[in-house]
Image: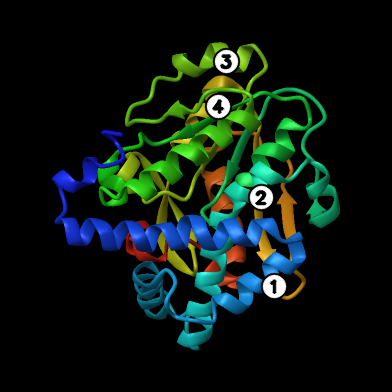
Amino acid sequence: MTKIFSGIRHLSLKDWLIGNTRAGVEYVLVPGLIALLPFRLGVRLGWWLTRFKLLYRGGVHQAADQAQNFGFAADRQDFEHRCRFHRLMDLTDLYWSKTRSDRHIDRNFDQTGDWPADGPVMAVTFHWGGGHWGIRSLHRTGRPIVCLAGPLDPEHVGHLSVLYRYACWRTREVEKHSGRPLFKRYRGIAVRDLRDKAKSGDSILSLIDVPPGEVGGARPVTLLGRDAKLPNGLVKMAELLKLPIVFYAARINPLTARVEFRIGAPLDPTDRDAVLQEAARWLDEMIQRDPAAWMLWAQAPGFFR
């Protein structure tokens, strides 16, 4: 109960009530109702609902501003619609995960590529579309997975109780389908903390497109035709753990109401520059294909400093 009302210490009662009411609608009510419908019908309803500008207004406006600066939102109205849609689909992933069996993947996914047949891997994804189902897909191969994530702090969600609880629910769902507790990721994470897990056969999973200033340590790449940087910590970790790197990405196509799920070929992490440029190539191709599916437009300048 203390955690539920802790945000009142940091916000006025009015702001706390308004913020939690909006979060309840956007993070619980709407995605929860969509998840109750047959999958494709829910996707189509989500596409229709996100035509209206009431949902996810703040984050969408910031994303559109930056996307326009980079030349990816010429039709701002269409970009914002797609941005709202992908945010809603990403939030609905939690409720689909709770209510759908593994057969959901077989029925509604168009998969390109396969996970390596044997051994642990370093599975690496992006803040593009929704990567939640990749955890379940990899775990179906018999691999336990250690998912790396940043520490959860109420300040990160604006001290809004609904957002904090949603993040906790999502963490528990990740742990359920990975078979391992979430590994909290901090600056200077010690590889030795993960070495025993990798030796026992656990795969490692994380996201690579994080602004370098947030994690420390980066190498130059070419992204969107510009000089940029991507963090090199995951590649270095994979090299020290002797794990092949496998990129994957997923997004829901609003036209087909199906999930496009792509798994790359395993890469040798010893050539860090080549692996990071391949990561940049993946991200570049995905942004070109569906710019609004990238969740980090608001932080985009941090990749190009």
State left or right for residue 39 relative to residue 189.
Answer: right
Q: Residues within 10 Å of mark 1 (few under 14, many from 20)?
A: some
Residue 53 lies in quadrant: bottom left
Element type at marker 1?
helix
State left or right for residue 64 relative to residue 292.
Answer: left
Whichever of callouts 2 and 4 sits on the residue coming sooner in the sequence is 2
For disc 3, the marked residue is: 197
Give the residue type that dot 3 points to: Lys
Instruction: Kindly identify the residue that appears in the image at 74 percent across and 22 percent down.
Output: 119
Q: Is residue 140 visible?
A: yes
State left or right for residue 209 relative to residue 150.
Answer: right
Label of residue 44 in the image: 1
Element type at marker 3?
helix
Task: Tell me the distance, in whole angstroms, between the alpha carbons under discs 1 and 3.
Answer: 41 Å
Instruction: Kindly identify the residue that appears in the image at 22 percent across and 46 percent down.
Output: 7
Q: Position of residue 40 (x, y in %)?
A: 76, 65
Task: Tell me the distance, in whole angstroms, between the alpha carbons under discs 2 and 4.
Answer: 35 Å
Using the image, determine if residue 104 lies above or below residue 252: above
Whichever of callouts 2 and 3 sits on the residue coming sooner in the sequence is 2
Instruction: Kindly identify the residue that appears in the image at 68 percent across and 67 percent down.
Output: 43
Task: Tell me the distance, in whole angstroms, between the alpha carbons under discs 2 and 3.
Answer: 29 Å
For disc 4, the marked residue is: 239
